[in-house]
Amino acid sequence: MRSKKPWLTLLSTALLSMTLLAGCGGAEKGASANQPAADGKAATASAAAGEPVKFNFYFTGSQNVKDLWDTLVPMFEAQNELVDVNMVYIPSGTGAEPTYDRIMAAKQAGKGSGDIDLYEDGIGVVAQGTKDGVWQQLSKDAIPNLSKVNANTMKDVDNYAIPYRSSAVILAYDSTKISSPPKTLDELLDWIKANPGQFAYNDPATGGAGSSFVQTVIYKDLPADDIHNSDPSVMEKWDPGFNTLKELGQYVYGEGIYPKKNQGTLDLLMNGEVSLIPAWSDMVLQQLNEDLLPDTVKMQQITPGFNGGPTYLMVNGESDKKEAVYQFLDFVLSPEAQTVIVEKMNGFPGIELNNMPQEMQDKFTGVAEGFRTFNLGDLGTEINKRWQSDVAAQ
């Protein structure tokens, strides 16, 4: 799914930590957003003699991602006989970089889309493709259900990508020990000091939950826009945050033990060794569903929120199948498809919760709202390096 990656919105809107991330360029860098509406007639206009328009959809991830598209694509095709989605799955760990390289090489050589019309990936590829002028800028005229996506989430990627599902970092806690979990970062920091050894976060270089906690502390008192700023000058403002993290070392699990990976802290919570951790919402939900975590584990988002991490769909600006792709994307953003996404991925919907069935809205109360997207670019790596030297090495 991710390092860990976007069940709660970007829980709508880092990582997500997702969190998380690089800024995106302006509209002049991509194809025009003024495309015809994605209705069935437009999608089939270029088809020969009633033959379906076929486009190629490349995606990567774990088996659950493949299972998701194996469910959604047949649903779409059953409702849209004149569009054929050719899925190309790249298993997680086999390297998705050649796919982007192929798109870029075809563009540079003037050879169209490279037979890749729609692509799924994370914020880094969104930002790179925006910079390179690869992605198509999208509009509600072409994809009506885009109106159901949070406007700020779309603004964050300048409309060059669709965050069709999301996850966010939240606080996971043992409700048998904590009746009223912290609701702000200040309350969380006070709680950690008042309950030594009962809080853990993972090494930020090994998983997004720990990275989100570290970044949230570092940016606590910085201007709000700095979480979308990748300029190295921001590093000069990091000292107070790192001082806080160093001070916390004596109060966290094992007086300064930082588990590896997102699962490391979940294991501590599962075994009762700690009672409060930052964790990815989709991981918590999945493990609750599989009875790997006790049902006494609950979730809470803080204000301002930890980062959320969406997964994005991007349209190749060189594709000559855009109308068919838009028709598919409009389906993906429908409440019908989003319900399947939530159920299969244990993540937040890509559309705003008020567009979802009430029972789904109730499920996410207090968790899917308020997360933020951190677009730090290469500064995320710099944070991890400094954390290792200033905090872990104490």
Image (cartoon, rainbow, N blue to C red):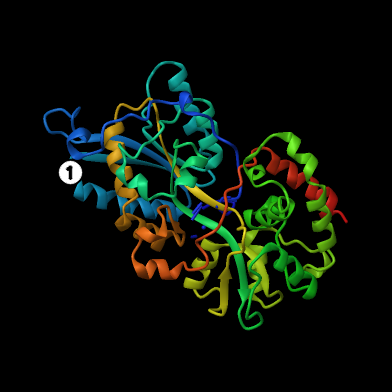
Quick check: 343 left or right of 254? left
Residue 24 or residue 99, whichever sits in front: 24
Taking the spot 58% from the left edge, 50% from the top edge, the residue there is: 14
Residue 366 x %, y %: 52, 68
Q: Amino acid type of disc 1?
A: Glu
Quick check: 197 left or right of 80? right
The furthest residue to the right: 394
Taking the spot 38% from the left edge, 31% from the top edge, the residue there is: 116
| Residue 186 found in image quarter | bottom right
Residue 62 or residue 219, whichever sits in front: 219
**Residue identifier under label 1:** 81
Mark 1 crowdedness (10 Å alpha carbons): few <14, some 14-19, many ≥20: few
Q: Quadrant of the C terminus?
A: bottom right
Residue 93 x %, y %: 54, 45
* Residue 196 appears in the figure: no
**In the rendered view, would you say 184 is above or below 24?**
below
* Residue 320 appears in the figure: yes
Residue 64 x %, y %: 43, 56
Residue 150 or residue 107, whichever sits in front: 150
The furthest residue to the front: 223
Counting every numbered tag in the picture gives 1
| Residue 33 found in image quarter | top left
Taking the spot 24% from the left edge, 40% from the top edge, the residue there is: 84
Taking the spot 56% from the left edge, 70% from the top edge, the residue there is: 299
Q: Secondary structure at mark 1?
A: loop
**In the rendered view, would you say 247 is above or below 139?**
below
Residue 278 x %, y %: 64, 63
